[in-house]
Amino acid sequence: MNGANAITARRMALFTFVCQTGIGIITLPTALANEVGHDGWISVIITGLLAVTVAALIAFLLKKNSGKGILDINKLVFGRVIGTGLNFLIFTYLLIAASAGAKIFVTYLRISFFPLTPPLIMSLLILTPSFYMVWYGLKTVARFKTCTLFSYAIILVYIILIYRDIRLTFLMPVGEAGIIPLLYSIKITYFSFIGLELIAVFYAEITDKDKALKWHVYANIFSMLFLLIITAASTAVFGEKFLPVQSVALFNLFRVYNVNILERVDLFIIASWFFAMGCSIRAYMMASWYSLIKICKVQKNAFIYLLYIFLLLIISRIPKDINQSYYFLDIINYSGMGITIFFILSLFISAVKMKGGKKHEKG
Amino acid sequence: MRKKKEQRIDLPLIQERIKDCPDVKQKNVFIDDHHEAWFFYIHENIDNDLIQRDFISPIINMTYKQLSDIKAVKNIPNGSIKLVYDTNEAIKEIFSGSAVFVFELISYAISCKIDKVEKRTPIEPSTEKNIRGPHEGFLEVLESNIGMLRRKIRNDALKFKTVTLGSITNQTVVIAYLEGIANKDLVDGLFDKISSIKLDGMPAIGYIEQSIITHPNSLFPQFLSTERPDKAMAALLEGRIVILMDGTPVVLIAPVTFISFFQSLDDYSTPWVLGSFLRIVRILGGIFIAVFMPALYIAITSFHYYAVPMELLLNLAKSRVEVPFPPIVEILILEITVELIREAAIRLPTYIGTAVSVFAGLIIGQAAVEAGIVSNLVIVIVAATATASYVIPSTDMALSIRIIRFIFMLSASVFGIIGIVACTIFVLGHIIALDSLGQPYFTPFSPFSSEGLKDSIVRLSFKKLKRRPVETRANKKVRSE
Amino acid sequence: MKKVKSLSLFVLCLFTFFISGCWDQKIFEEIGLALALGLEQTENGKILYSMTMPVFSDEIDETIEILSTTSDLLRQSRDQIRYTSGKKVEGGKIQHIIFSKELAEKGIDNILDVFIRSSENPLLANIVVVDGSPLEMLKMSRDYKDKPRIGVYMANAINNARAHTATPDSRIYSFTILQYCETIDPIAIYISFNEMGIKIEGTALFNKNKMAGNIGLVETGLLHALMGEKIQFGYYIKARSMREEDDSDDRGISILLHRVKRKVKTYVNGTSPEINISLDFKGIVNETDLNYRLDQSKDKKTLEDKISILIKQDCIKLLKYLQEIGSDPIGFGEIIRAKHNEYFKSVSWKSIYPDVKFDIDVKLNFEFYGATN
């Protein structure tokens, strides 16, 4: 089991990067346009810097805690019973995040291509590869992320290709929204950076822990840059008045380019982006499955896995329409913030305890 | 006295065991004109001239005293004289192609291997042709194959570990590796795995492969099979391990990666730009065209009509209007026909085979379109796909790609482009989870290795390819200058 | 028993796969591919929706199928048309949306909503305004013996015109973006038709979402130059306009303007803004019968200056017309909003626009003049 979950610091960074940008990017431009007009990109920078700080803090505290993951640390800090209870809460959060992600993924699929296909069949189709890879462990899941880099490359090339439709005046005047709305918008943008806390769940599996801090910070910086590019491009193409009207801004961005022979390329680019979206959900599925195995202290077995799959599918059926799905995502957003703060507290207490313990030993 | 009796070879037991084996000859001789002794050998598998000259003749002329003297026995002028102390082993020797001399008055039997096996000339294997490399292939006789490898690698580092497998057939299997370069743990692990195979016998090397494979249910081959000695030699130099088996010219190479199945000697024997071009053509054709083209056609004509280019739209619609079947049925009809022709062509003699392919081409081509069964765009797609799948040098991988194509087509017909995406993710995830002899299968893409990328989709010049591939875990990472 | 159970389960699953069918399947040849969509007003205020689809069957003589119906909403019209046509009409491949001039003048408000909402529909369809009735044009196109089907014919004509900056690159997405942004006015392709074929007339200008006027082919080129976009259009000057000595009717010069650098500077003085535009053209001489030695720098400079003055006059005329009809396709409102935001918020741009002072500076340079001088 250990071998199947071993991961290097670099790959953990890639894991975090894809987890953050996979789903968060799609509705971010619209949400920001609603809140701060054309200054969404400033909000991304502010939230990005905040996320980088939080990520660095978590990675630093993990380093001080001698290489244990958050699940073990909770048990040490709060005692076995309360610790297990808190771990169970963490598992619930991760499971709900995975289900909500799966539901919104299926919803986007149905908006883009297949409105009439039943959602359960669609979920089974797109989740089966994820179930397969999660069964094989974190190593396989993380290695797959390397293959999704080509989706990012395609999008960046596309943004360069639509340079003629980009109007820089749509991004001006800079800062018109004002400081207070920009600060308020952090809570919207933070949703795109959720995923930085997963390093705490998997920390024990990282093989070269001394590089983990550096790479985790890099991952968040890259996420911020990517989100910045997409937000700025969407605002520059659509303008702050048209952007709030759209529900899938990123996919609409793919519909504006006219290629010589093929005419429309949105079909292929959206299909390639599904790789990244699938990876984003798979990250949470892996985290929730891993924490379940750790909490129950069992070897992975097919029966528990089937139960887990069943639970995931049931929860993903709870939101009845797209508005409820977005509401679910909001819940995940706020829970994610809470969970991150809780992780930092728990790690801090544990680090202090350890330092105190060491001092006693020395004394 | 009792000890001596236990040590003796049991002649009646041997004669009992060779009953109903008319191919085993028993030659009765008299030592010192007095004591009866026997020669046992399989007449057809022995070089009779050499046996008479170098084995039977010297032994008949030896006295009882000389035969009891081990040193005198070992002076018999033949390279492979062996002393056998156990009756069962003596019987094994007889049936393994040795001539065995049994004399009840001495405690051992003398075995001599002078086999003359029918060997064909080493011609280039028909499934693995190339332009600039040698045109020879392995034979069915293990010793010849070992000899070929030794002629190519004239170095004492080339070692062969032998093991006899097959509880009934007693076949010899050999693991070849370069000592000091190949990873010792991998060699030992492989040797242990092979030694623990329990089968009656192995008509082909695929039996060994399936017994030691870690993912037996996978569609993808995890060992590279080849009949070319130059490929085996190149593999050994990279630090890989070669498995040879008596009775088959096909050898297995491990550990390999996904991209190894798309490499051929021509990439390396031509300058690097041309070699890279060949490699890219092979990968583009073998993977993208062979797998994605039919599935994309089905997805677009069944679900995403708006993706058809304007110029193609009218022609496509015109040709499709006459066809009564949905796109998936249309393509399946043609694909299955092509698969049937492929399978039939393997078994047909060449002169009929050529006629059949022309006939089939005509039928599938013109007649099917005129009859209104298929549209002409589908003919072009299926023909391109069939041609593209032949560029893959490895037949195992070509077979896997063929099967995957069907899976892609079926999922595209039900779920359109999302079916293709889901299948791609599944196949990629599966390839990443696979391993060949414990080494990750999708190196250098997925456990990312920038060194490995220099010899994957392109083949950079030899100056840049200084290091051995990472998956072989070689002891000496750097190749010689 | 276990084997039987698992086998029957497997077979059941397989059945569900095939029985339920594919919910979103749209088999290519069963679809009626609408290539052009025409919209006009009827007498009682409803919208007449006409559509043309290519016909592929050998047994039918006509090459296109034209259907029309009347309703309030586009999707409703499409569904109604499905009952007349034998095919499942889909709009995913629509190449042109053709508005009648009257409907365009009344306002293209939310008509385009269905194109943005459904991801299957293209955002790349051309927005065309026709001087007349789209339905009549589609019907008349059946008699164009020497032209391909109307959808393809129009696409080719528009692409060729675009390549020579005779008509704008106006598609649904750009039209809608500009409609929403309210500081730049959209433009559309303007055509007319007769028994011989269709003719690209130039550009239809809009004030917000109502058509306010139209300009011709050369003015379209100048408009694009003022917008700072890529240009490649021919400019024809009669000798008379340049006040040449020999100003007989048949003398003149034809040049090709193929590159422009535009610089816009805005100043806000008091209540009305001033906008300075400088255009730096690069051109090629195509045809001339005037008495200029183009290999002499002095002569060349004189000719260039004279033509620059003419271009400047044409630009001023164009800008005056735009101010008159209240259309701002060049986006001066957007530039003022970006650079002088406080001022922009304090005024209503549409009411200020007619009073804006423009100062244009045009430079022209002939890179080469062909094989003769």
Image: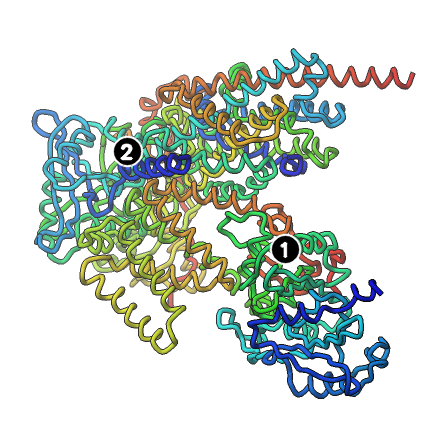
Percent position of residue C11, x then y: 33, 39
Q: Name the amino acid type tagged 1.
A: Pro
* Label 1 element class: loop
How far across and how far down the image is residue B407, in percent? 39, 48
- The residue drawn where x is 45% and y is 58% is B399
Quadrant hosting residue B247: bottom right
- Tag shown at residue C115: 2
Of all chains, the one bearing label 1 is B
Using the image, determine if residue B36 lies above or below residue A293.
below
Tell me the residue that label 1 is attached to. B255
Q: CA distance from mark 1 to mark 2?
A: 54 Å
In the rendered image, which quarter is residue B465 located in?
bottom right
**The C terminus of chain B lies in which quarter of the figure?**
bottom right
Quadrant for residue B15, please give it. bottom right
Residue A89 appears at what percent x and percent y?
57, 16
**The one of C149 and A132 positioned closer to us in this rendering:** A132
